[in-house]
Amino acid sequence: MTALITPIILVGGSGKRLWPLSRESMPKQFVPLLGERSTFQQTLLRVGDKSLFGRPVIATNENYRFMAEQQARELGIEIDLLIEPSRRDSGPAIGAAAAYAKSLGTEAVLALASDHLIIGEEEFRAGCRDGLAAVRQGGIVTFGIPPTEPKTDYGYIRLGSEKIGDVRKVAAFVEKPDAQTALRYISEGLLWNSGNFLFSPALLLAEMARFEPAMATAVEEAVAKARRDGATVFLNADAFAQAPAKSIDYAVMERTDKCWVVPARFSWSDLGTWGAMLDVGTADSAGNVTEGPVELDQVRNSYVRSDGPLTAVIGVENLVVVAMHDAVLVGHHDDLPRLKDVVQRMSDRNHKAATEYARMHRSWGSAEDIGRGLHFRVRRLTMKAGERLVLQSHRRRDKHWFVVNGVGEVLLDGKTRTLAVNDSILIPRNGIHSLRNPGSEMLEFIEIQTGEHLDEEDFVRHEDSLQRPQAAV
Amino acid sequence: MTALITPIILVGGSGKRLWPLSRESMPKQFVPLLGERSTFQQTLLRVGDKSLFGRPVIATNENYRFMAEQQARELGIEIDLLIEPSRRDSGPAIGAAAAYAKSLGTEAVLALASDHLIIGEEEFRAGCRDGLAAVRQGGIVTFGIPPTEPKTDYGYIRLGSEKIGDVRKVAAFVEKPDAQTALRYISEGLLWNSGNFLFSPALLLAEMARFEPAMATAVEEAVAKARRDGATVFLNADAFAQAPAKSIDYAVMERTDKCWVVPARFSWSDLGTWGAMLDVGTADSAGNVTEGPVELDQVRNSYVRSDGPLTAVIGVENLVVVAMHDAVLVGHHDDLPRLKDVVQRMSDRNHKAATEYARMHRSWGSAEDIGRGLHFRVRRLTMKAGERLVLQSHRRRDKHWFVVNGVGEVLLDGKTRTLAVNDSILIPRNGIHSLRNPGSEMLEFIEIQTGEHLDEEDFVRHEDSLQRPQAAV
């Protein structure tokens, strides 16, 4: 192996704190929060240096694998997928990643969050190299961030006196402090705990076996009994379910005496809240950060973002305003910790936009709701070159497809028809159909569903000759 | 004539102060601001008592006539339309209405704003009857509203001592005061000037001839030379253009000694600003008025309205939040007088949503933009029973129609085809086509336009056998 470090990117989270841009069906790591790339894609690009990093492994679950695959493909980056069959917190997730990396014979693993912002790619790589030296001397390495303000929503790291180059022994991990304690921590030189780790998989598993033997056994067995399908590894569900749900900090980091910390020279944010977006954005002279078609009038210290609607904001300060076609947030900075509960309440009241995105990303492309009437629904769909839909039918709805870009090949009740721009086809209820994009460009089409009952459950899957999981249209 | 009063409803205004719900292409009088009816419709219903009111006349311009027609038809109310060929302020508008009413032989005219809220229909009619008594004794009558707070954006009326029943002689009209003066006016018993008037058309024109002879001559000539088309009267453009642009207050009311005032016993608001919506709405215990899918968390004294998007508002007070699919407003109460300028700025920057509505009302139905792509555009259209589109063609775009409700009869290059639900037709560029709804229910269809250039100007009108103005699709 030429690469020294296998990056394992952890993709989970429900993203309620950045609602409405981030939602359960489309969590923040996949959303272009800053610039054109999602933080997941930025993370992939960050570990692109082949002299230092190997092929990235994405540790995620069934819900997010298609989005991860698609966003990696958009960058032309090949990945392995490590699919977690259940949510067991970060301890088992990182443990399984370590066990998988051990099975690859990897010297070191970099466990990276997929939803953090890091500015300073070169400093980041330098930190990894420094950390690697400590790993080689038996350390489990974390990245510590020099605080820029007395944050109360981060854990802190107290430095010990031992050094390996610039890497320092961890004296203690300390819990999220109150404001006054945070100020004291800053004056005492404590660092923020960024939650990204570099370690030898064998050592991490050994320490896990020491403190959480059931967890270590479970994750090693989940990897040993995993099912492989190409570059996708499905962890064994029964074994993984035996792992106690516990964070890696509680399970290992705060208990081992082998922790070292790289003081980061890069800028970092976990983009955990809308407030963070104001911190990391480029503010105007009144302290505002804006994005999209936004008009401000006597506004101060506010984050105003539109992903579509023309948005006018007048005479306010310390606000976050996020406008999308199907959802809007207006909140005072100080009160945004309650956003999570508010989203939960809206979800409890069955407001679809609380958890779902109008535009859904699928393995084969995307589908976006653009209109609904009493007995009809209009969607805008894209399908990537070479992709296809599973053979399917519906009991209670007709579908009409009209091509606006590219070429589509429709299979309907055994007959194949090719549709170019301006061609359309009606798929009657119970018609067994599929769709393929045989061209080299994106197929784009408008779908109009009609029927008395239009619900996603009305879907019958027929034999699939490719024998691989495919999503429904 | 059995009816005593001809109501003339004045429909103009650009509606910037209630953006985004009200826009230049869809001003506030046509928007359901409160409840399901627009204030224009509420005004029509208010003068529905046939023992008191005659057939209403709508004084408006070409831009708004189709919306006025449609909204009257929705209520099953027949109207006359008096079309102003140019905007000359309220003096010529009311003068022309008076001249038109005189030509009908009407005893009294009630000139009513179309965008005011009045609560208390019975008290309103009682006021009209009181006013009519004063009109019969040679008075020009205005409606005065007992102030509920020291408003600085209304004119006030000082009462004289003469009385006809409850109707009082006007001692003076006074201009919009500052806050302290407004307080004094309230203590002195002055009334707000609501800008609605009741008068004998002959007397109003006589007084206008006294103070503004050019205006009186112009409006009488504009009516004398008007072109009639069924119930629509087009004022003569050349004559009307000679009228000095001046408000009716400056032209007549503040100069005549014949003004009387009915102290209103109904509730009234001109709904001039978003602040007014908070005044007239039903507030919760925290002083909030909400409408639509809205979730509040520790919000006070705010007006929050969504016409679609799921809207969460957290930890603010004294705000107005109005969310629509294509436009959002967030503003502090105190700063909303600047909204007009902000809308103008957005309009200057060519933001379409500053002035246009995604959903446009036409004589034959409505058209709503629901999606746009690089070379396509998706619209959702409705067409009323019996309506048709003008015969037309396009040079640079193809259109595809798919019916989701009702029945449509398409005429394409001389051939007629009937489309029911799930039927579609492609109309190629240069195809001469029309569409009719031959059924008794609403026709609803999805239109997909394709082409390199998609603009509304690409429209060729062909011979129109009905010889009447029709709007383009």
Image (cartoon, coloured by chain):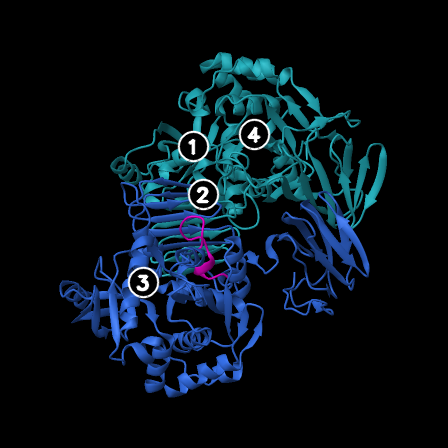
Chain colours: A blue, B cyan
Pointers 1 and 4 in contact (CB under 8 A)?
no
Please give the label number shown on residue B268: 2
Magenta region includes residue B110 = no
Q: Kindly state the secondary structure of the residue where label 1 is placed.
A: helix
Point 49% across, 61% down: residue = A26
What subunit carries mark 1?
B
Q: Quadrant of residue A177?
A: bottom left
Does label 1 or label 2 sit earlier along the sequence? 2
- Highlighted range, magenta: A26-38
Q: Label 3, label 4: how many angstroms apart (C-alpha)?
A: 85 Å
Q: Which residue is mark 3?
A: A128
Q: Which residue is mark 1?
A: B344
Point 54% across, 58% down: residue = A70
Q: Label 1, label 4: how many angstroms apart (C-alpha)?
A: 35 Å
Q: Main secondary structure of the magenta part?
A: loop
Q: Position of residue B251 (x, y in %)?
A: 44, 20
- The residue carrying pointer 2 sits among few (fewer than 14), some (14 to 19) or many (20 or more) residues within 10 Å by Cα, namely many
Please give the label number shown on residue A229: none
Q: Nearer the viewer, mark 1 or mark 4?
A: 1
Residue type highlighted by circle 3:
Cys
Residue type highlighted by circle 4:
Val
Residue type highlighted by circle 1:
Gln
